[in-house]
Image (cartoon, grey):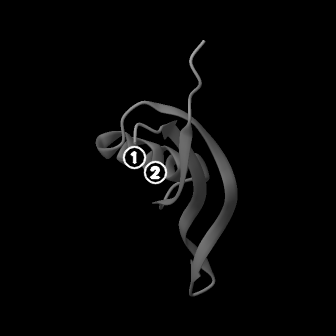
């Protein structure tokens, strides 16, 4: 079996509705410019607060994809 190498990038997705939608936004955006996505890990969840209310949910996501560089 040939060896594989994967690159990991860290992205932050945001949503006004939920952490799940924030993480999904990050993955869906990554899929538009990165090929061969392999896995993702939610590294951190936080909130943006304004005037005492939640303005946005933020999910920091580590996404891996197959590295094809030389």
Compared across the picture, whether 25 is left or right of 9 comes to left
From the image, which quarter does the C terminus lie in?
A: top left
Residue 48 x, y percent position in the rendering: 58, 75
Compared across the picture, whether 65 is left or right of 34 comes to right
Q: Nearer the viewer, residue 13 or 17?
A: 13
Q: Taking 14 as reference, is 40 above or below it?
A: above
Callout 2: helix, strand or loop? helix
The span from disc 1 to disc 2 (Cα, nearest Å) is 6 Å
Q: Taking 62 as reference, is 3 above or below it?
A: above
| Residue under numbered circle 2 | 26
Residue that appears at 56% across and 36% down: 5
> Which class describes the residues within 10 Å of circle 1: few (<14), some (14-19), or many (20+)?
some
Residue that appears at 69% across and 55% down: 43
Q: Do tag 1 and tag 2 residues touch (Cβ < 8 Å)?
A: yes
Residue 30 x, y percent position in the rendering: 39, 46
Residue lying farthest right?
44
Compared across the picture, whether 51 is left or right of 41 comes to left
Residue lying farthest front?
70
Residue 32 x, y percent position in the rendering: 30, 42
Residue 10 x, y percent position in the rendering: 55, 58
Residue lying farthest left?
32
| Residue under numbered circle 1 | 30
Disc number lying in front (1 or 2)? 1
Callout 1: helix, strand or loop? helix
Q: Taking 56 as reference, is 42 above or below it?
A: above
């Amino acid at each position: 079996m040939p060896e594989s190498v994967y690159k990991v990038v860290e992205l932050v997705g945001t949503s006004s509705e939920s952490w799940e939608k924030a993480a999904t936004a990050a993955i869906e955006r990554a899929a538009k410019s990165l090929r061969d996505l392999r896995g993702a890990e939610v590294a951190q969840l936080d909130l943006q607060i304004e005037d005492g209310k939640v303005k946005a949910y933020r999910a920091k996501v580590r996404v891996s994809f197959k590295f094809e560089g030389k």
